[in-house]
Image: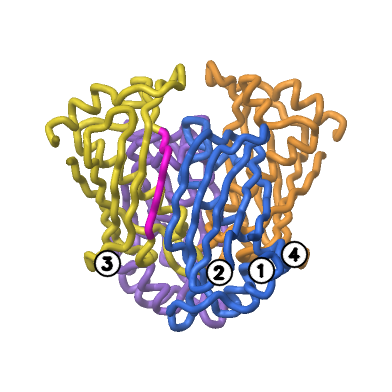
Chain colours: A blue, B yellow, C purple, D orange
Amino acid sequence: MYRSTFDLRVRYGETDRMGFLFHAHYANYYEIGRTESIRQLGLSYRQIEEAGILMPVTDLSIKFMLPAHYDERITVVSVIPKMPEVRMIVQGEMLNEAGQCINRSEVRLTFLDAESKRIVTAPDMLTAKLSAHF
Amino acid sequence: MYRSTFDLRVRYGETDRMGFLFHAHYANYYEIGRTESIRQLGLSYRQIEEAGILMPVTDLSIKFMLPAHYDERITVVSVIPKMPEVRMIVQGEMLNEAGQCINRSEVRLTFLDAESKRIVTAPDMLTAKLSAHF
Amino acid sequence: MYRSTFDLRVRYGETDRMGFLFHAHYANYYEIGRTESIRQLGLSYRQIEEAGILMPVTDLSIKFMLPAHYDERITVVSVIPKMPEVRMIVQGEMLNEAGQCINRSEVRLTFLDAESKRIVTAPDMLTAKLSAHF
Amino acid sequence: MYRSTFDLRVRYGETDRMGFLFHAHYANYYEIGRTESIRQLGLSYRQIEEAGILMPVTDLSIKFMLPAHYDERITVVSVIPKMPEVRMIVQGEMLNEAGQCINRSEVRLTFLDAESKRIVTAPDMLTAKLSAHF
């Protein structure tokens, strides 16, 4: 498996009137976690797109255990449990500053040819980097 | 069951560079659908909060089938399949202008006393309105 | 001049932990006001883009007088004070449910050829619709 | 004067279908710049709020010169040109990776007592930290 972490801080504009991170933003945080996960492989999601491959999300499930608060530093953990083929699974969790797991997710993405919009297998530029971890 | 619909239009700032509604915003659309669903009962989510009850999301799952595009009119369908007790389930789907189902979701929410932050049963002001539908 | 109005409601995810509409979202509301202003002319901003013209914002100024609250119905007023040439000025204000002016803005946009990214004059499809108002 | 910088990266969900950072998000970036500016003084905006002082934005003006692109690293510069009294002025600019100035802003904020919602002078906890720079 391939596991990476990325820290970010809850922005004022991301809180809601409960004073918590608004629930829809968690999907965005996990997206940022995936992006940085790929960057830590020595590649960037931007490069994958520029090579003509899009990676839309097809399934998203999130379990909310504890809230995240304004200005709190959150660690987003991203795990790719197996080598992607026509789809990629990313399991995530978020830890607060006290190390508590506050949130869990599973996201499924597919690989699309940007021109034809047809499903393709994971591009070599990604699998070459990932293979060292499997 | 209680079923309601609400139409909204994809905003420019909600699209991403693929030209589609960014995936994290679907959770927000479903939240707006729930809010309007409650309003159509003759109540408002704001009144529920003002009565001291919060309704945080505890579980969210979304299945993405087709993209939503800039300026497209989207119908958000919200279904409450059974009377809420300590939690409420809302099943949703989104239809595009051609009537295609582009997205499906299930959201679970809990009822919290705003002061004590303890789980409580669904408030009477909500169940009284819902009971006519079950 | 051409004046139009559009109503929208403050979404939960747009509030911040002060309980108010987060200040960065006003620019988005004014953008939605402009979009609907063009639609009320019998055209759509989407059609303008599809005809190869982009309209990026070059200047934005906003004066905040009173807050907007969760679930409040806000009327966005958009005024185009003179026929656009290479740039378009849109003056806006927001009214709350009590009819108070809570916010004022001025936005300047330019017209860009989407291919060459060069500044062009306002497209005929827009000026033809606007000219009836000047 | 007090000057600080903070780097952030354009998120996928912040781009629009032009492929650029959506214009309403610049106000958010400048807000993040201010928050980190205060943190670099050895204080946090969260502490100011917890001490009962809110700092709503009263005026915002932004000049857009060049776009910011997906995944680009942007440096947000925040300058407080004079000691705040009942209001604080923050002048900002954004630099792209090539060092070009892509955007300029001026934001005015006021200090409010969170209870009474009345305007107050800048709190000592902030002016004590700032005074070393003036």
Query: Do badges 4 and 3 share one subunit?
Result: no
Residue at horizontal 65 percent and vertical 50 percent from the top: D105
Magenta span includes D1: no
Label 4 residue SS: loop
Q: Residues within 10 Å of mark 4 (few under 14, many from 20)?
A: few
Q: CA distance from mark 1 to mark 2?
A: 9 Å
Instruction: Give the amino acid at mark 4.
Output: Glu
Q: Are marks 1 and 2 in contact (CB under 8 Å)?
A: yes
Chain to which the residue tagged by mark 1 belongs = A
CB under 8 Å between discs 3 and 2: no
Instruction: Write the start and end of the magenta stretch as one range.
Output: B56-63
Q: What numbered label is drawn on residue A84? A: 2
The residue indicated by pointer 4 is D97
- Prevailing secondary structure of the magenta residues: strand
Q: Is residue C84 visible?
A: yes
User: What is the C-alpha distance between the residues marked 3 and 1?
Assistant: 52 Å
* Quadrant assignment for the N terminus of chain B: top left
Q: Is residue D72 left or right of residue B98?
A: right
Outermost residue, front direction?
A: A134
Q: Is residue D132 left or right of residue B94?
A: right
The chain to which mark 3 is attached is C
Q: Which mark, residue D103?
A: none
Q: CA distance from mark 4 to mark 3?
A: 42 Å
Residue drawn at x 14%, y 35% as measured from the top left: B134
Q: Secondary structure at mark 2?
A: loop
